[in-house]
Image: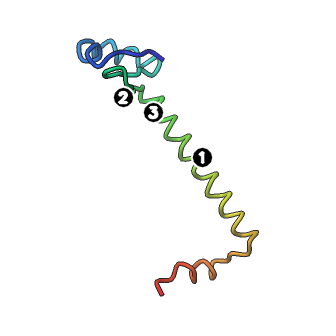
Amino acid sequence: MRTVTASEAKQGLAAVIEAASREPVMIQRQKRDVAVVLSPREYERLVRLNVAEFQRFCDQVGAAAERAGVTEAKLAELLADE
């Protein structure tokens, strides 16, 4: 991953955008990472990956609840505002 300072990014935005089409570009301010510039394709890939990972997590929690005997009725009872 390429790293540039915030000043370099500001002065050479076109170059940062071009580089981001090939790989993520880390932007640093005072030697601290403050931002990453990604291509739209890479951003969408990460979003899809996160959604898929969250779905797997939900499926695992649901399966564990089912094994523990949690039914729709029991869940509704637990979530009731009483």
Q: In the orientation shown, which residue stands out farthest toward the right?
A: 67
Q: What percent of the width, then of the height, locates residue 66?
A: 72, 70
Q: What percent of the width, then of the height, locates residue 19?
A: 40, 14
- Residue drawn at point x = 56 percent, y = 40 percent: 49
Q: What percent of the width, then of the height, locates residue 32?
A: 37, 25
Q: In the orientation shown, which residue stands out farthest toward the front?
A: 30
Q: In the structure shown, which secondary structural element does the residue marked by tag 1 occupy?
A: helix
Q: Is residue 44 above or below residue 24?
A: below
Which label number is shown at residue 43?
3
Earlier sequence position, callout 3 versus callout 1: 3
How far apart marks 3 and 1 lie (CA) works out to 15 Å
Earlier sequence position, callout 2 versus callout 3: 2
Mark 1, residue position: 53
Q: In the orientation shown, which residue stands out farthest toward the left?
A: 11
Mark 2, residue position: 35
Q: Is residue 66 above or below residue 41?
A: below
| Left or right relative to 30: residue 39 | right
Q: Residues within 10 Å of mark 3 (few under 14, many from 20)?
A: few
